[in-house]
Amino acid sequence: MLPQAHRLRLEKDIKTLFARGKSVFGSFVGIKFRANALPVSRFAVVAGVKVSKKAVTRNRLKRQVRAVVHEMLPKIAHGYDVLLYVKPQAVGKPFDLLQKEVLAGLKKAKLL
């Protein structure tokens, strides 16, 4: 679980990120990011009903993506709001493949 200071929670922050953030796309995970004026980076993970109708599947994917972010937290650049949204192609994929995809997206966004 991410530390509380690293969680992006407010709906207005997420909407602003969707409206004004820059995007990076991978085959399993999309990333939206935007600079903030805080000393830490904040993260949110989204897996909508289009990913899977089963909440168990969506929650598992979100936990896996959060685990990757938590592991790489010291290496990720500070001062960004980051939204990672899971795509339907990620369902049923092994964790190591999902991990590579998230890391590749963060590098592409120049956050690592």
Image: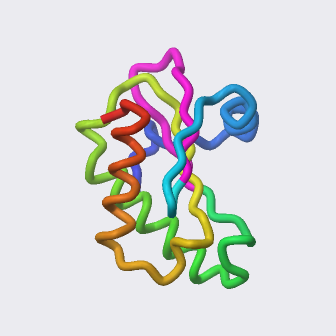
Instruction: Kindly give the residue lying farthest to the top in the view shown.
Output: 37
Percent x, y of residue 20: 69, 26
Residue 87 is left or right of residue 62, and the answer is: right
According to the image, what is the colour scheme of the structure?
Answer: rainbow
Q: In the image, what residue occupies the spot 27% across and 53% down?
A: 71
Q: In the image, what residue occupies the spot 60% across and 74% down?
A: 58
- For the stretch drawn in magenta, the main secondary structure is strand
Which of these two is toward me, 75 or 3?
Answer: 75
Q: Which quarter of the rendering shows the N terminus?
A: bottom left
Residue 96 is left or right of residue 31, and the answer is: left
Q: Quadrant of residue 11?
A: top right
Residue 27 sits above or below residue 39 on the image: below
Q: What's drawn in magenta, residue-wise?
A: 30-45
Number of numbered discs on residues: 0
Assess whether residue 34 is covered by the magenta stretch: yes
Assess whether residue 33 is covered by the magenta stretch: yes
Q: In the image, what residue occupies the spot 44% across and 37% down?
A: 5
Percent x, y of residue 62: 51, 65
Residue 18 is left or right of residue 23, and the answer is: right
Q: Which quarter of the rendering shows the C terminus?
A: top left
Residue 98 is left or right of residue 20, and the answer is: left
Which of these two is toward me, 29 or 75?
Answer: 29
Q: In the image, what residue occupies the spot 24% across and 37% down?
A: 75
